[in-house]
Amino acid sequence: MSWLDEIKWDEKGLVPVIAQDKDSGRVLMFAYANREAVALTAEKNTAHYWTRSRQKLWHKGEESGHFQKVSAIQFDCDGDVLIYQIEQVGGIACHTGRKSCFFRTLINQEWQITDEVIKDPADIYTHGHAHP
Amino acid sequence: MSWLDEIKWDEKGLVPVIAQDKDSGRVLMFAYANREAVALTAEKNTAHYWTRSRQKLWHKGEESGHFQKVSAIQFDCDGDVLIYQIEQVGGIACHTGRKSCFFRTLINQEWQITDEVIKDPADIYTHGHAHP
């Protein structure tokens, strides 16, 4: 049996994936992957996902250049969530031009922005908007 | 508008939550929360979830004693995922008695256990199995 068969895919054939900076531990992104995406990630050591909005395989960085080098894949006790331990090329994981997609923090009952924009998205996505 | 209204709840009224050790950055758990669980978490600074298998509000630690003190709640760009930054009481988040639920790593095309059991689950759940 392949290690891929041990993953409990949801009713859409997807598994949630947490992308974590392998050095800082910062959680950079959360997305979903299908079997093909996880297999390609393990084979090529670069993060692949399934975009639910565009309904296609998504090689992260294919439009932005912000690829994610994957050094390890972790698996939870229930077998239905993965972590990609990554090095984020360009230091920007979020389509807003920030390091992490988790750039808002609940402070005084409001979501306050606690991360700066590193690069204007207009300068990242020169061939159209690539966010899923 | 409440900050809770900004969360994009899924079709079941849930939001995925990543529980992360606020100091080490280790991802300890992944679960879901409904509106009541998130509201209680913010109000009481102790992690609440919704267990999908038991279909009820879940105050993490209510049976194991392994509560999670929440120091911050973070929110992603799409508004549909949360991170609870936590201090894990007892140092054990997983129902298997390990620090983290993500205790398996893909090595040589196999899921290998890379985290030790800290405490026998039989000694944790003295009143029956409490894992969702």
Image (cartoon, coloured by chain):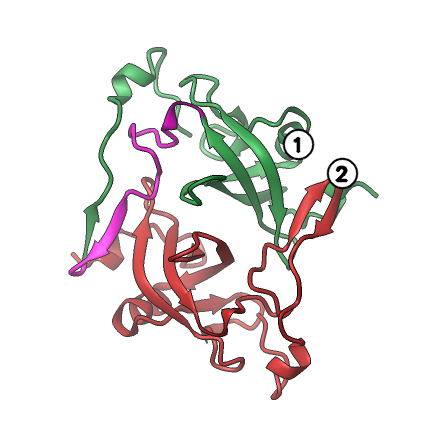
Chain colours: A green, B red
Q: Which mark is residue B109?
A: 2
Inspect this view and state whether residue A11 appears.
no
**Residues marked 1 and 2 touching at CB (< 8 Å):** yes
Read off the magenta span. A89-109
The vertical placement of B32 against A102, above or below, is: below
**Which amino acid type is shown beneath numbered disc 2?**
Gln
* Front-most of residues B88 and A100: B88
Separation of marks 1 and 2 at Cα, in angstroms: 9 Å
* Label 2 Cα neighbours within 10 Å, binned few <14 / some 14-19 / many ≥20: few
Q: Please give the chain letter of the residue carrying mark 2.
A: B
Inspect this view and state whether residue A86 appears.
yes
Which residue corresponds to the image point at 63% horizontal and 55% vertical from the top-left?
Answer: B103
The vertical placement of B84 against A59, above or below, is: below
Q: Please give the chain letter of the residue carrying mark 1.
A: A
Residue A38 in the image: state x and y as whole percent: 63, 35
The residue at which mark 1 appears reads as A42
Which residue corresponds to the image point at 23% horizontal and 56% vertical from the top-left?
Answer: A106
The vertical placement of A28 against B73, above or below, is: above
Residue B82 in the image: state x and y as whole percent: 37, 53
Residue A58 in the image: state x and y as whole percent: 52, 26
